[in-house]
Structure formats: structure tokens, C-alpha cells
Amino acid sequence: MKAMDLASHPDASAYGVLAPRSPLVRRLLARNPSAFTFTGTGTFVVGQGTVAVIDPGPDDPDHIAALIGALVGETVSHIVITHTHMDHSPAAPALKAATDAEIVGCAPLVLSDDGPRADAGFDATYAPDRVLADGDSISGPGWTLTAVHTPGHTSNHLCFALPQEKALFTGDHVMGWSTTVVAPPDGDMADYMASLEKLMARDDAIYHPTHGEAVTDPQRFVKHLLGHRRQREAQVLRAIGEGWTTIPQMVAAMYAMVDKRLHPAAGRSVLAHLIDLERRGKVARAGDVWSLA
């Protein structure tokens, strides 16, 4: 989406407003729109009175002040983190200092990565009071959040289920406006696909992604995401078969209609597919050159 589209999107008028999404869910949008965050990071508040805050967002003083101001009169019991990219977790220390809430969620992950990024870097300041494993829960008056381990976008990624509304907070594993970035070395395509299959086996009625609008038909949406990735995999195999044997050649062929400034990031996605295909014995590599196995 172009910058002008982001600026004119209805969400752009709602920055700094804690808006209701359902009886138990409210959202406050951070003013950090970009090609990879859509209209910005959606910080979710779960519950009424005693609440949990999911993905407090970037270290942006205006966003943090708006969030703290919107929660005056309520008790924040938990600050919940889906993963440690810079647009999700860095506001946690400031929110903890203001509320004395417990920081819980994914495990810390700091990754040195000098390649062309297709998303935010990792938050080196993240220090949870408690790491949640798959199936672990926290709760407050009238609400429960249960961790669902969904590696792929990052190895430490968690979604959180709210059974009272059959809702799932999907972080960046499923986004409401675009496909998810899967960028090696930490992003793993096989893990990402397995995590999507894991969601297919669930009966959630609605997804609340950190970026983009709610997904109201989760099963169909996840089926589409799986199909998209399988199509990309087929494109990679076809490109190699037609003689495009390096990642820049594959990107030029597969992303011909995409802004060339995004091609380095697209190369990371192609690499994720190639690594997965190599593990499955479908392709082989010699240096930077790939071939069908």
C-alpha cells in the first residue's frame, strides 16, 4: 500500500484513541505506519477494570502516553508480548514502570542479522518477568488468555487465545492486510506452514492481528495463506527449472511487477522457501547457485 493510501485510511484518524472492538477487546493504534506495519501497531487491551495489554508497541512517547492515559482508573495486571520485533515490545518497560504490571509472553530473542530486513529488528531490551509456553494461561476478571506457540515469522512467536470470545490475537503470524514476512535466519518457512496448519485445527471465530483489521472468517483466510505459500514454492521450483538459478534472478522473474526497492526483502522470502525445499530434498545448492535435486 502506498504512503498516501495509509494516510487516508480510516484508521489514520483514530491514532491515540482506545476504541472498542468487542465486549472484552479494545485497540489503540500507534502512529508508526509503514510498508511493513500498515497503518501502525495495534495495541490491544483485554478485559474491563483489570486488564491485559497485548503488544504495547514501539518506544514512542506519544503512543505510550496515550495508552497510559486511556487506562486511567483501570488496573493493568499483565503486559503480554507476542514476539520481540521493535514495533511490538519496546514500550513494555515504560508501561510496566507506570502500572507495575507483569511482563509475560514470548521468550527473549536477540538476533544479529546484517541482511536486508523486510520487517523490524529485534528488541534487545525485552526482559519478561515470565515466559509462557504453549498452553500456558493468564487470567483476570471475566477473561483468560492462553498462549499458542506459532513459530515461523520468528522462532519465539506466540498467539493468544481468548476463549470467552473464541478470539485469537495473532500478532504477526496472521496479519489482516498482507502476507507475513518469513525471513531467515530466524524466520523458518517449514515452521510457519506448520503453525498455519495448527491454526486450521482450531475453532476460533475471529482473529485480531497486530497489523490490519480483524479477520472474521479465520479458516478460509488461513487456507488462502497456505495456498499462497504453496504457489510461491511452485514459482521457485519453476524458476529454477527455467534457468533462474540465483536468488536475484528468481526475484527478478517472480517479482517483476513489484517495486525494485523491495526486491532485497523479497529475496529473503525466496531464501526461506529454498531452505525449506533443500531440507525436503527438492533443491540443492552450490554456493549461490540453486538447482533442482
Image (tube, rainbow, N blue to C red):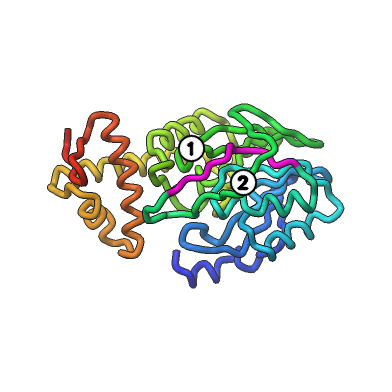
Q: Is residue 150 above or below residue 269?
A: above
Q: Where is residue 21 in the image (x, y as percent from the top left)?
A: 68, 51
Q: Pointer 1: what residue?
A: 155
Rounded to the nearest angstrom, the CA distance separating label 1 from label 2 is 15 Å
Residue 293, quarter of picture: top left
Q: Residue at x 41, y 35 (%)?
A: 193
Q: Is residue 111 magenta?
A: yes
Depth check, front residue: 69 or 156? 156
Q: Position of residue 248 (x, y in %)?
A: 24, 54
Label total for image: 2
Q: Which amino acid lies under the numbered mark 1 shown in the image of this protein?
A: Ser
The secondary structure type at the circle numbered 2 is loop
Q: Which residue is drawn at 51% across and 59% down?
A: 38
Q: Residue at x 57, y 40 (%)?
A: 108
Residue 79, quarter of picture: top right
Q: Give the range drawn in magenta.
A: 102-112
Q: Pointer 2: what residue?
A: 126
Depth check, front residue: 53 or 290? 290
Q: In this view, does 251 lie to the left or right of 25?
A: left
Q: Residue at x 71, y 48 (%)?
A: 45
